[in-house]
């Protein structure tokens, strides 16, 4: 056993991806537990690590010192040495003390699911707002643990090494600096939020029907978004490929009008609470929508758990009562084709909502989906009398005082976007 805490310092000589040992602990009913650790492996991969071994433990309650028992801790240590692993990742949240003890015992960096998710978010954030939100979540995570050195905040990437290395020194200073920084970031986020609120307000007043794609991470939201609006939102076989909300106009022939379609950040089980809080502004896009397209990976063995988790987060952000269309995506991967591409499915509470089977990748079922969106938008009472036309599609009067409802053909007035079907 290594008694030198520096043994847990990041291995800076490492080249290529970090080798990780994954650990999951079954704490019995009422605790989320994935016996395959597949999702954690995908998270690790999304953070640039490779999984070299998986360890499953069973306990009635977490051990206060090591989370797992000392026998398991030894087993993990042996695996780490055998595979030359750079770090260990736990599927459950570790207390700062457990993390420190494990690092000392095993001799490599130890992190948990929360840290991993935060790291992925930090690496993915693109927009100013996204970056601020991630920084706030990380600062809050660190502030509640208070074992990290300030230098860790500067690190944006770098595999397990970037998450390792506890530092006892300077904690008091860190604490104050973190507190100050949190205040700054919150103030800046407030400003961005106001701007976003103004934009949303304009969209609402315009009477445009707002549709948001929501769903578990990797369900295929961005792929579907791209297929529907012919855009190129970043889609990839990574968890949290999308962090920023993108909105495009989607013209629906069946409706004879355009709706606003937004692609949003994906949800995941045990999403760190601070992260949900920090991403409030982004998630607001979903809670303000008139209709949610709940995209589900129909080929996932964890389909039900994933749907439940999404419903739970929707409840948390106040979006439980928004009408839904459940979109069963990845139809091309299903062994048995469904009898109908469109039927009904129950949401929690027994509400029946339309379910549409699609393959965003192959384009199957998209017309049925467009039709369903058009029906919901058509049935919605948008109170057009009180609304102004959407400024993006406003038709300028040809002569002062003359306001044509439709642009005369051949006029150079802006025209409606062409049908995407
Ligand atoms: N076979 C198949 N794969 C699909 C389909 N739709 C999406 N995928 C794949 O699923 C993976 C995830 O797709 P994304 O569109 O990035 O998923 P997302 O829901 O936006 O994911 P996040 O942004 O990470 O939350 C990609 O590898 C896609 O190519 C589909 O209809 N069939
Ligand atoms: Mg996406």
Image: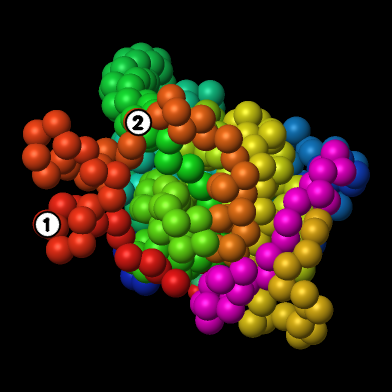
- Quadrant of residue 153 in the image? top left
Magenta span covers which residues? 346-368
Q: Which residue is tagged 1?
A: 412
- Establish if 263 lies above or below 31: below
Name the residue rendered at 47%, 37% in the picture: 285
Find the distance from the CA under tag 1 to the CA under tag 2: 22 Å
Is residue 365 among the parts visible in the rendering?
yes
Q: Is residue 155 left or right of residue 400?
A: right
Q: Which residue is tagged 2?
A: 388
Name the residue rendered at 61%, 74% in the picture: 365
Image location (x, y in percent) of residue 196: 34, 30
Q: Is residue 367 magenta?
A: yes
Looking at the rendered structure, which numbered label has been put on residue 350?
A: none
Is residue 243 among the parts visible in the rendering?
no
Name the residue rendered at 87%, 43% in the picture: 350
Badge 2 crowding class, 10 Å Cα cut-off, few under 14, some 14 to 19, many 20 or more, is some
Name the residue rendered at 48%, 42% in the picture: 209
Image location (x, y in percent) of residue 142: 47, 30
- Establish if 142 lies above or below 210: above
Image location (x, y in percent) of residue 420: 40, 68
- Which of the two labelled residues, at mark 1 and mark 2, occupies the earlier sequence position? 2
Image location (x, y in percent) of residue 176: 36, 14
């Amino acid at each position: 056993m290594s008694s030198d805490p520096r043994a847990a310092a990041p291995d800076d000589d490492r080249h290529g991806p970090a080798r990780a040992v994954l650990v999951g602990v079954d704490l019995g009913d009422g605790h989320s537990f994935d016996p395959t650790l597949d999702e954690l492996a995908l998270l690790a991969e999304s953070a640039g690590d490779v999984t070299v071994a998986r360890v499953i433990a069973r306990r009635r309650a977490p051990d206060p010192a090591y989370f797992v028992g000392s026998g398991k801790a030894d087993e993990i240590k042996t695996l780490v040495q055998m595979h030359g692993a750079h770090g260990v990742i736990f599927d459950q949240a570790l207390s700062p003390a457990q993390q420190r003890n494990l690092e000392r015992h095993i001799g490599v960096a130890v992190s948990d699911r929360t840290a991993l998710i935060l790291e992925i978010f930090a690496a993915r954030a693109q927009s100013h707002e996204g970056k601020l939100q991630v920084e706030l979540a990380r600062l809050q995570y660190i502030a509640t643990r208070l074992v990290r050195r300030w230098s860790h905040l500067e690190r944006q990437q770098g595999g397990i090494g970037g998450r390792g290395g506890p530092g006892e020194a300077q904690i008091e200073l860190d604490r104050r600096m973190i507190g100050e920084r949190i205040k700054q970031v919150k103030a800046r986020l407030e400003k961005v939020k106001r701007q976003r609120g103004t934009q949303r307000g304009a969209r609402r007043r315009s009477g445009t029907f707002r549709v948001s794609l929501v769903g578990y991470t990797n369900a295929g939201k961005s792929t579907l978004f791209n297929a529907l609006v012919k855009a190129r939102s970043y889609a990839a076989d990574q968890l949290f490929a999308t962090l920023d909300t993108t909105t495009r106009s989607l013209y629906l022939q069946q409706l004879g009008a355009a709706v606003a379609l937004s692609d949003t950040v994906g949800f995941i089980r045990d999403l760190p609470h601070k992260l949900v809080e920090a991403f409030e502004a982004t998630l607001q896009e979903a809670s303000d929508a008139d209709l949610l397209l709940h995209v589900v990976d129909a080929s996932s063995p964890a389909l039900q758990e994933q749907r439940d988790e999404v419903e739970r987060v929707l409840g948390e952000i106040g979006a439980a009562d928004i009408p839904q269309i459940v979109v069963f995506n990845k139809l091309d991967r299903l062994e048995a084709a469904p009898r109908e591409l469109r039927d009904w499915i129950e949401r929690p509470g027994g509400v029946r909502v339309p379910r549409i089977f699609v393959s965003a990748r192959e384009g199957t079922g998209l017309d049925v989906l467009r039709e369903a969106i058009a029906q919901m938008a058509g049935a919605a009472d948008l109170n057009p009398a009180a609304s102004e036309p959407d400024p993006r599609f406003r038709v300028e009067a040809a002569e002062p005082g003359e306001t044509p409802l439709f642009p005369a053909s051949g006029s150079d007035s802006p025209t409606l976007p062409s049908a995407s079907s």
